[in-house]
């Protein structure tokens, strides 16, 4: 098969020319250095250039001068090697496609990966199909599943694309069902069947990150764990959020037009939206305020257009959760959940959390307890994120349990001044709101809500609302803070 734009003889010729340039680059460097040295002599020692790459620095290692401009021999040689490897990869892909009567997506054929190996593909396909009739026996099927998972995760992008072409939907569905069936093994109640949620998500994420666009739909149908549902959320069922007073209709998945980042992640980028997950959004906003680089480093874009977000599972294992770029939108195409003012990164953290979170024990809005549409334990959906406790979110976001510090002003100030994100929950009612407060202050205080400490000045605590920077802050005295809030948590970020 021939791909437009890949003239391999010319590509390999380019690699050869780069190697030739690499061999002659030291002479070029020497000539440039002489010119710069002569220029500095004529300038009575003043620098001949403002470029840091060309500035003359007398450094030597083992007696060998390391003088700018930097030696290109290594980088040119590395580039030539990469070109040759990619050309070999493409040639092998073409040969295998002819042999397997399958296809490798053009987005994958020129990857800098080892050439695809037909034997690896055959063994992986055999292992996948063998699981359909595997006798789990007294030990369950977990060990067998982990072996198959390791085999499939070891495939390159091209090998995975060819395997997905040949695997039937039934082959993939059978593996999905066995992985998701994590319970005792029939007459052997202590047998380990299936895989824990974190391992299932890790498997699907690793493969989705390198699946070709043509097979992405097939893969996501087989392993739907990376697209959390929203039809059990309060806002979907009620089409209204009684805290914000905003209505939402026509929820659907769609791809937003805003970019992932517009700069460094900031607390001001984050708006909670209409989902009842203030306890997580407040944790993320507080972290963005104190350690934005931590959040920036936790998102990466994959060559196939998917995103991977760093998050931890309930057992403290770090997972890179891969997902497509679709998000819940309303009938007007506006985001329903977390979003930013021109950026989308916060929404993908929320989506990753919805995929992994296992701590939901049920919970419903007032007056709806016992209604199974609202009041049920969930996993892997946006509905699982609603109405939960603020100390549950930090371990998933940071990898560390938060530390409960109460609502003593001095303790909160010590944590905040020490650079820790701090979140705190408001009381379940407004009974203790001072009469002297203005109506604006009273409206700013939302009961059963989680805030983040935005600043502390004098004896006043300023609390930010995760609804977004357009929402009024709540400024309280030491005594008001103690009366109106509870369960302050110090987040541990990094390390």
Image (tube, rainbow, N blue to C red):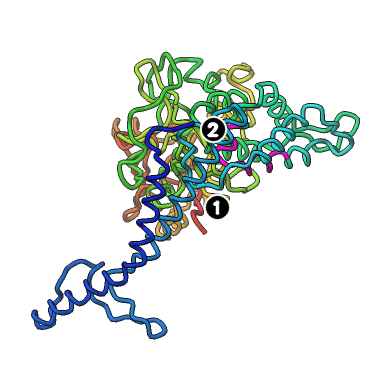
Q: Which residues are magenta?
A: 148-162
Can residue 150 be found in the magenta stretch?
yes
Residue sitting at x 20%, y 66%: 51
Q: Work out whether 478 lies above or below 354.
A: below
Q: Nearer the viewer, residue 384 or 329?
A: 329
Residue sitting at x 86%, y 39%: 139
460 lies left or right of 317: left
- The secondary structure that dominates the magenta segment is helix
Residue sitting at x 36%, y 43%: 267
- Residue 201 image offset from top left, x and y in percent: 61, 37
Q: Is residue 334 visible?
A: yes
Instruction: Indicate the secondary structure of the residue bearing disc 1.
Output: strand
Q: Work out whether 395 lies above or below 414.
A: above
- Residue 354: mark in rendering: 2
Residue sitting at x 53%, y 35%: 94
- Residue 262 image offset from top left, x and y in percent: 30, 41
Q: Nearer the viewer, residue 94 or 265?
A: 94
Crowd rating for badge 1 (residues with CA inside 10 Å; few <14, some 14–19, many 20+): some
Can residue 141 be found in the magenta stretch?
no
Instruction: Indicate the secondary structure of the residue bearing disc 2.
Output: helix
Residue receiving disc 1: 403
- Residue 178: mark in rendering: none
Q: Is residue 436 visible?
A: no
């Amino acid at each position: 098969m021939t791909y437009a734009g890949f003239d391999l003889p010319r590509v390999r010729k380019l690699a050869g020319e780069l190697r030739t340039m690499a061999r002659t680059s030291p002479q070029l460097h020497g000539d440039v250095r002489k010119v710069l040295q002569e220029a500095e002599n004529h300038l009575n020692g003043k620098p001949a250039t403002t470029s840091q790459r060309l500035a003359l620095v007398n450094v030597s290692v083992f007696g060998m001068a390391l003088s700018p401009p930097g030696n290109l021999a290594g980088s040119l040689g590395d580039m030539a090697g990469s070109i040759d490897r990619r050309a070999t990869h493409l040639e092998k892909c073409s040969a295998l496609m002819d042999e397997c009567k399958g296809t490798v997506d053009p987005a994958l054929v020129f990857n800098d990966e080892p050439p695809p190996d037909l034997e690896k593909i055959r063994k992986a396909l055999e292992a996948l199909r063998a699981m359909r009739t595997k006798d789990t026996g007294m030990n369950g099927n977990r060990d067998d599943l982990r072996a198959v998972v390791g085999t499939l995760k070891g495939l390159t992008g091209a090998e995975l694309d060819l395997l997905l072409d040949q695997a039937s939907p039934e082959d993939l569905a059978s593996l999905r069902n066995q992985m998701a069936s994590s319970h005792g093994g029939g007459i052997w109640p202590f047998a380990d069947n299936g895989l824990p949620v974190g391992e299932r998500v890790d498997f699907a994420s690793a493969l989705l990150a390198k699946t070709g666009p043509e097979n992405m739909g097939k893969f996501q149908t087989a392993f739907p764990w990376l697209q959390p549902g929203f039809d059990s959320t309060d806002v979907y069922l009620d089409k209204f959020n009684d805290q914000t007073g905003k209505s939402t209709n026509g929820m659907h998945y769609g791809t937003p037009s805003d970019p992932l980042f517009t700069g460094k992640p900031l607390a001001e980028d984050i708006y909670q939206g209409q989902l009842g997950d203030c306890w997580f959004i407040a944790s993320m906003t507080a972290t963005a305020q104190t350690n934005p680089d931590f959040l920036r480093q936790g998102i990466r874009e994959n060559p196939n257009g998917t995103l991977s977000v760093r998050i931890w599972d309930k057992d403290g294992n770090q997972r890179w959760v891969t997902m497509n770029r679709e998000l819940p939108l309303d009938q007007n195409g506006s985001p329903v959940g977390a979003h930013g003012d021109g950026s989308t990164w916060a929404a993908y953290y929320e989506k990753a959390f919805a995929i992994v979170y296992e701590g939901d024990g049920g919970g419903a809005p007032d007056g709806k307890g016992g209604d199974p549409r609202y009041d049920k334990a969930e996993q892997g959906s946006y509905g699982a994120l609603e109405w939960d406790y603020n100390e549950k979110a930090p371990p998933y976001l940071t990898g560390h349990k938060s530390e409960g510090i109460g609502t003593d002003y001095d303790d909160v100030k010590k944590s905040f001044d020490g650079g820790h994100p701090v979140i705190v929950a408001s009381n379940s009612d407004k009974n203790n709101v001072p009469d002297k407060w203005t109506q604006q202050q009273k409206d700013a205080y939302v009961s059963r809500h989680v805030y983040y400490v935005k600043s502390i000045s004098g004896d006043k605590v300023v609390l930010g609302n995760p609804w977004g920077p357009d929402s009024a802050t709540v400024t309280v005295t030491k005594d008001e803070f103690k009366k109106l809030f509870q369960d302050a948590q110090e987040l541990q970020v990094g390390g």
